């Protein structure tokens, strides 16, 4: 949008871009200090109770001295980028011929970057189907080290994301679920070549990979 554009008024430019003039002058209001404190407390609660939705989050915040209703809790959870962890549609399934590794992070103190990374797959709904998103995340910082999108669930795009991530650093541990993409020889061999310890969620333990979830 060019406010000094000769020959085209602001109204005409808005019409071309299908924008309302009111949105042009809108300035986003930042979070208050109180909301920032609530978000910090909510983050701590979520790490301890990842199964909490907005109702139980609101209740716990009130117990800790914050007057937060369910609607506001839901809004702040969206800003924080978290939602209740619960069993949902699975995108990865174990292959009986693949080696399954034990979960190694239970007693590990993750107090700096590159101790442990995690990876998981989710799907993005489109008008005519789905695409699949795999991401690699540093658990300590929650930084997304790499990600890839694909229209199939083959292991190739997971391997590509892993290789891209390892071009930027090397963790001591790498955690995933037991899905065939992550337990495939193509994927695990990349980790073994870098001498990275392979960790996988325990069967039925939905919160083992909570951070990338």
Image (cartoon, rainbow, N blue to C red):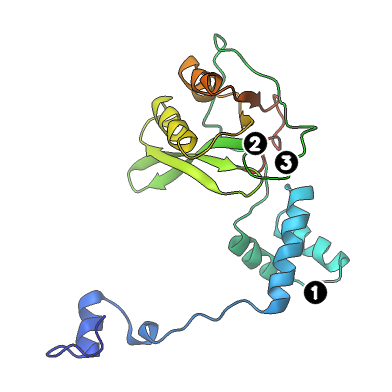
Name the quarter where the N terminus is drawn.
Answer: bottom left
For the residues labelled 2 and 3, say whether their Cβ atoms are less than 8 Å apart: yes
Local secondary structure at mark 1? loop
Which is more N-terminal, label 3 or label 1?
1
Q: Quadrant of residue 31?
A: bottom right
Q: Is residue 49 visible?
A: no
Q: Mark 2 points at which residue?
A: 116
Question: Which mark is on residue 67?
Answer: 1
* Residue nearer the viewer, 117 or 91: 117
Left or right: where 72 falls relative to 150:
right
Local secondary structure at mark 3? loop
For the residues labelled 1 and 2, say whether their Cβ atoms are less than 8 Å apart: no
Instruction: State how far apart marks 1 and 2 are (Cα).
Output: 36 Å
| x then y, percent, for residue 118 | 60, 36
Which is more N-terminal, label 3 or label 2?
3
* Residue nearer the viewer, 142 or 114: 114
Closer to us: mark 1 or mark 3? Answer: 3
Question: Which mark is on residue 110?
Answer: 3
As drawn, 198 above or below 185? below
As drawn, 110 above or below 155? below
């Amino acid at each position: 949008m060019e406010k000094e554009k000769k020959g085209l008024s602001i109204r005409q430019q808005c019409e071309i871009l299908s924008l309302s003039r009111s949105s042009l002058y809108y300035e986003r209001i930042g979070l208050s200090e109180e909301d920032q404190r609530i978000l910090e407390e909510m983050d701590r609660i979520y790490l301890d109770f990842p199964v909490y939705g907005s109702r139980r989050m609101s209740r716990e915040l009130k117990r800790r001295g914050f007057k937060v209703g369910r609607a506001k809790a839901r809004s702040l959870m969206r800003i924080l980028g978290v939602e209740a962890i619960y069993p949902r549609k699975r995108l990865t399934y174990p292959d009986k011929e693949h080696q399954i590794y034990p979960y190694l992070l239970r007693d590990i103190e993750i107090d700096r970057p590159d101790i442990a990374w995690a990876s998981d797959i989710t799907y993005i709904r489109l008008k005519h189907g789905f695409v699949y998103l795999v991401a690699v995340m540093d658990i300590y910082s929650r930084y997304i080290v790499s990600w890839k999108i694909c229209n199939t669930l083959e292991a190739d795009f997971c391997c590509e994301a892993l290789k891209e991530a390892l071009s930027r650093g090397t963790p001591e541990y790498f955690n995933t679920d037991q899905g065939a993409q992550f337990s495939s020889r193509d994927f695990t061999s990349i980790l073994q070549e870098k001498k990275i310890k392979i960790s996988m969620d325990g069967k039925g333990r939905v919160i083992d990979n909570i951070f990338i979830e």
